[in-house]
Image: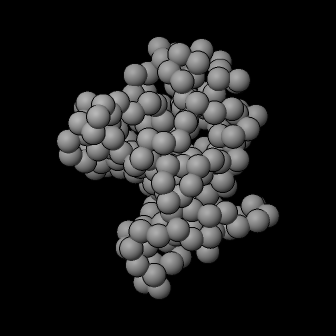
């Protein structure tokens, strides 16, 4: 498969699988939702993986697709170049907030994997996923060791920060205290056709 959509109708459920996006030499393990043809590029449900990582780690990916992970910017870019994808953002606080955007595009590493996409097509503007995407549009990816805005160091994670150091950041630290929810406790970023 070049993405999880090619397994739709063959497999079902949310499971890990290997895909080989166009231009990538070796298959990469991803989390797929075969029922909805979603290839997850980020998922966080345990809060046990530190997302304050280097440029190289964000480029190549880290974590475990059965827990918390980042697929890797080079894989995300390869995926975005092979088809016209929708970008789906979701987060859980006391309920799920989900937003979807068409026409995902990720620029090259030379241009810091700058992110663009179309206008909101579903979801609720004003919720954090929508706010996140509005602030991330057109921004370059930043990490503590490649941080043109200074925001990755400030927030302790890699993200597409704007010059005002956007407050919405799906890679930021979870705020959970003794099992009671005080902030975001799960996030997922997926692409689908």
Residue 192 appears left or right of 140: left
List x then y, in percent, for residue 180. Answer: 23, 36
Q: Residue at x 42, y 47 (%)?
A: 46
Residue placed farthest to the front in the image? 178
The answer to whether one can see residue 114 in this image is: yes
Q: Which residue is rendered at x = 54% and y = 24% of the image?
A: 156
Q: Nearer the viewer, residue 65 or 97?
A: 65
- Residue 156, relative to residue 71: is it above or below? above
- The quadrant of the picture occupied by the N terminus is bottom right
Q: Indicate left or right for 112 with 173 as reference.
A: right
- Whether residue 107 is visible, yes or no, is no
Q: Residue at position x 48%, y 42% from top?
A: 48
Which one is nearer the viewer's eye here, 43 or 20?
43
The image quadrant that residue 35 belongs to is: bottom left
Query: Residue drawn 66% across and 53% down?
Result: 75
Depth check: 5 or 82 in front? 5
As drawn, 80 above or below 26: above
Q: How is the image coloured?
A: one colour
Relative image position of residue 124 (x, y in whole percent)? 23, 41
Asked if 2 appears above or below 43 in the picture, the reply is below
């Amino acid at each position: 498969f070049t993405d999880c959509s090619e397994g739709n109708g063959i497999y079902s459920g949310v499971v890990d699988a290997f895909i080989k996006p166009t231009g990538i030499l070796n298959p990469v393990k991803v989390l797929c939702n075969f029922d909805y043809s979603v290839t997850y590029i980020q998922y966080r449900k345990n809060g046990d993986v530190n997302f304050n990582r280097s440029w190289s780690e964000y480029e190549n990916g880290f974590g475990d697709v059965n827990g918390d992970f980042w697929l890797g910017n080079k894989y995300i870019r390869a995926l975005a170049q092979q088809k016209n994808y929708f970008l789906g953002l979701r987060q859980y606080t006391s309920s799920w907030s989900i937003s979807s955007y068409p026409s995902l595009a990720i620029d090259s590493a030379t241009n810091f994997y700058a992110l663009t996409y179309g206008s909101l097509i579903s979801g609720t503007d004003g919720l954090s996923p929508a706010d996140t995407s509005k602030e991330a549009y057109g921004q370059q990816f930043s990490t503590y060791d490649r941080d043109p805005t200074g925001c990755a160091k400030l927030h302790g994670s890699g993200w597409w920060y704007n010059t005002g150091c956007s407050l919405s950041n799906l890679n930021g630290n979870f705020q959970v205290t003794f099992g009671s929810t005080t902030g975001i406790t799960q996030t997922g970023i997926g692409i689908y056709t």
